[in-house]
């Protein structure tokens, strides 16, 4: 009993020290950007390994893939998980949270941030850096130049908003576009599994069309309209932040329009074959 009580007290002491360490360093505002980025990189690696493990036991198609196809399979698994996480966080901050609401009068909307918003952006930076590293390392197997440009711009813009606290609202607006990533990945999975002629493939294609139009076309128009309405606050940002607010969404928006054209052609081609 004495030994057990002594062990319990020792364990409680270590637990208290760990909580102090986490609150003082890992979750402190000064260290939050760094810990969240490292957490994002760690989470990305963990999801990659879990995708590999689960696919090995539960998907017969996985065993017949080439080495590079297995890497892409796992890579798309981790990108889907990141997309679900950051889309949920972005939708919350843009449409439900009061942090960036016009009714919240504490400072300009372009300078508002919170520990949770910084953490979410940090996790996203960790993912973009990890995925960009894989794309460059295996170039061009996991994507061509457009993917390098997309991930580089995303990492820079999201990283700037995370470290400075500037323009986080517009960063989350752009990140809502990750809503289309799971559908794009599902399309690749179905194609790789030989289900390109299935009804699931056709339905997923229709979902991609509407999701892309809303999240990557109309929402970008709304973002620029919001910038127009709050230009007097946007212009107060640091010149680098001001440049990123206009440059990154413009480039990504142009790429979205280009990809949207390919989506329309692909869907029309698929429907024509069905008929």
Image: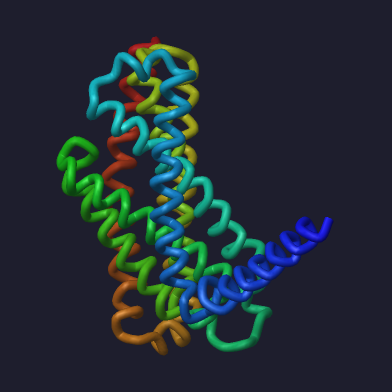
**Residue 260, how many percent across, how many down?**
33, 41
Above or below, 206 relative to 249? above
| Residue name at image x 40 percent, y 76 percent | 163
Q: How many marks?
A: 0
Residue drawn at (58%, 68%), measured in percent from left and top? Answer: 116
Location of residue 83 in the rendering, given as x and y in whole percent from the top left corner: 46, 47
Q: Is residue 137 left or right of residue 216?
A: left
Quadrant housing the N terminus: bottom right
Q: Is residue 126 visible?
A: yes
* Of residues 189 and 58, the one drawn nearer to the viewer in this rendering: 58
Above or below, comparing residue 267 to residue 114 in the picture: above
Rendered residue at 49%/23% (across/down): 203
Is 192 situated above or below 123? Answer: above
Q: Is residue 179 left or right of residue 197?
A: right
Q: Residue furthest right?
A: 1
Q: Does residue 11 appear to the left or right of 116 in the view shown? A: right
């Amino acid at each position: 009993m004495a030994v057990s009580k002594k062990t319990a007290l020792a364990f409680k002491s270590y637990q208290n020290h760990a909580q102090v360490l986490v609150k003082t360093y890992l979750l402190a505002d000064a260290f939050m950007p760094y810990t969240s980025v490292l957490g994002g990189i760690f989470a990305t690696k963990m999801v990659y390994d879990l995708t590999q493990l689960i696919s090995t036991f539960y998907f017969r198609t996985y065993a017949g893939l080439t080495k590079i196809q297995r890497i892409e399979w796992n890579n798309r698994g981790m990108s889907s998980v990141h997309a679900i996480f950051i889309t949920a966080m972005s939708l919350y901050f843009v449409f439900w949270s009061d942090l960036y609401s016009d009714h919240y009068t504490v400072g300009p909307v372009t300078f508002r941030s919170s520990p949770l918003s910084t953490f979410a952006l940090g996790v996203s930076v960790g993912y973009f850096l990890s995925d960009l590293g894989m794309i460059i390392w295996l170039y061009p197997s996991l994507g061509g130049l457009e993917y390098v440009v997309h991930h580089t711009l995303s990492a820079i813009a999201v990283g700037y908003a995370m470290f400075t606290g500037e323009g986080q609202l517009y960063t989350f607006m752009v990140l809502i576009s990750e809503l289309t990533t799971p559908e794009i990945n599902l399309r690749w999975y179905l194609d790789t599994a030989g289900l390109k002629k299935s009804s699931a493939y056709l339905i997923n294609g229709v979902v991609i069309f509407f999701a892309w139009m809303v999240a990557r076309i109309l929402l970008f128009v709304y973002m620029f309209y919001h910038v127009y309405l709050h230009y007097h606050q946007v212009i107060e940002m640091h010149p680098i932040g001001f440049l990123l607010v206009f440059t990154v969404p413009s480039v990504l928006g142009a790429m979205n329009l280009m990809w949207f054209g390919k989506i329309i052609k692909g869907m029309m081609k698929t429907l024509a074959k069905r008929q």
